[in-house]
Image (cartoon, helix red, strand yellow):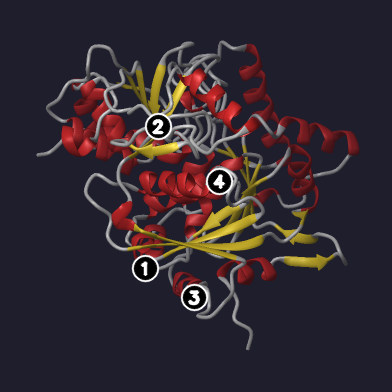
Amino acid sequence: MEKTTLFDKIWDAHVVRSVPSGPDVFFIDKHFIHEVTSPVAFLNLEKRGVKVKYPHRTIATPDHNVPTVDQDQTIKDKLSRMQVEKLRENCKKYGIELHDLGSAHHGIVHVIGPELGITQPGMTIVCGDSHTSTHGAFGAIAFGIGTSEVEMVFATQCIMQSKPKKMRITVEGEIGPGVTSKDIILYIIAKISAAGATGYFVEYAGSAIQSLSMEARMTICNMSIEMGARGGLIAPDETTFNYLKGKQYSPAGEDWDKAVAEWSKLKTDDGAVFDKEYTFDAADIEPMITYGTNPGMGIKVLGNIPTTEGMEGSNKTSYLKSLDYMGFAPGEPVKGKQVDYVFVGSCTNGRIEDIRSVAAFVKGHKKADNITAWIVPGSKEVEKMAQEEGLVKILEDAGFELRQPGCSACLAMNDDKIPAGKYAVSTSNRNFEGRQGPGARTMLASPLTVAAVAVKGEICDPREVFQN
């Protein structure tokens, strides 16, 4: 009997038809949409006189463009307001479930899906957003699609997709103190580069991965796209099942038992072959931070920016251009560099576990005077839990500003922008030029490192700041 990977098992079960020497017609279980990539797709449906084939398989929420203050008031930005209004109109017209601004389950699309139990093992999930790979943490095939594909899913519940190659990344051993899943994934990307997994779908494995909570696994899978992968996934286990049990959309009663029995089969067979494999030692992973303009340009917080030794031609030119944008020099340390903003939030690190960890570290401390500190929950549910658990008071006492749910300062599509030339240490997923605002300089790090930077006012090692 052929040995197959977890990815193969899910993929092959969803192929409706294979096109000879071409892509597969691939069935989609769940389709998440938001206000930015859906309006044109809806418009094209209307022009063609086509209906949404399975409205119950689509879930909507506005997140990218929404303000994170005064959400009960009319959105001031005209384009953002139009996009959110169009999403409301289209969801009403086509009978699509919408978690709107102000509703109990509004939030970032990749936060509310798992939170509600919509995301489940063995599913295929797409969204017009590259970080759809987040949902792979549940043992699902999840990936971002373009607007034309959003339209295709609306009309047929399928897309045309060529099967990617398979990669396994194994991280073995125990994670050290002060090290989080964000450090693990930044470490991996720094090792294999921002293009190292291009053309692959990645399965994460090993004892270090298995020891992670569901929220931490979501952080890992979320950033798969940042090394060029089509997506990433982790085999479901007891941690997955415990997280999903009792969620609003999870199976219940006998259906739950049947579901767990099926989900338990979703794992890679011993001896299954991957196209490429990497293995890393968890003991080598320390708190990480980026210094350049792509997520692969990362180092240990206590490390030095790489020199140009061995670099030639365009590689050297683009490297120096990146450092020039950031105001850094080859070979220098990042520790001790002053920072202006810190941001905790996004679909990468805007979950309750992230906010709990920051609150625990800053309790009894004050942010530095030179720091503007924003905490943005990934959903109304996260916001509610933070309030009920007393985290909001701890954070506000430390000088942090807690905002309302949304993508916020992860990207410059709303009002939460970092001013030109200013440095931000951010828990988000990308540090491209202008990602957080024109001229903004972004350094990616874990929530713990962000908390330490906020208190110290400069780049530092969280293990040194919070020794007790």
Q: Nearer the viewer, mark 2 or mark 1?
A: 2
Tell me the crowding category of disc 3: few under 14, some 14 to 19, or many 20 or more residues within 10 angstroms, Cα based: few
Could you tell me which residue is drawn at 39 percent across and 59 percent down? 246
Element type at mark 1: helix
The percent position of residue 316, horizontal first and vertical second, equals 57, 30
Question: Residue tagged by mark 1?
Answer: 238
Question: Residue tagged by mark 2?
Answer: 305
Amino acid tagged 2: Ile
Question: Residue tagged by mark 4?
Answer: 227
Q: CA distance from mark 2 to mark 3?
A: 52 Å
In the rendered view, would you say 310 is above or below 114? above
Give the farthest residue toward the left: 468
Task: Name the one closer to the observer, 366 or 316.
Answer: 316
Element type at mark 3: helix
Q: Quadrant of residue 393?
A: top left
Amino acid tagged 3: Lys
Q: Earlier in the sequence, mark 2 or mark 3?
A: 3
Give the farthest residue toward the bottom: 1
Task: Name the one closer to the observer, 419 or 357.
Answer: 419
Q: Earlier in the sequence, mark 3 or mark 4?
A: 4
Amino acid tagged 4: Met
Q: Which numbered tag is attached to residue 258?
A: 3
Q: Earlier in the sequence, mark 2 or mark 1?
A: 1
The percent position of residue 225, horizontal first and vertical second, equals 57, 45
Amino acid tagged 1: Glu
- Mark 4 near mark 2, Cβ–Cβ under 8 Å? no
The percent position of residue 443, horizontal first and vertical second, equals 42, 28
- In-image side of 130 versus 463 (left or right): right
- Mark 2 near mark 3, Cβ–Cβ under 8 Å? no
Q: CA distance from mark 4 to mark 2?
A: 19 Å
Q: Nearer the viewer, mark 1 or mark 3?
A: 1
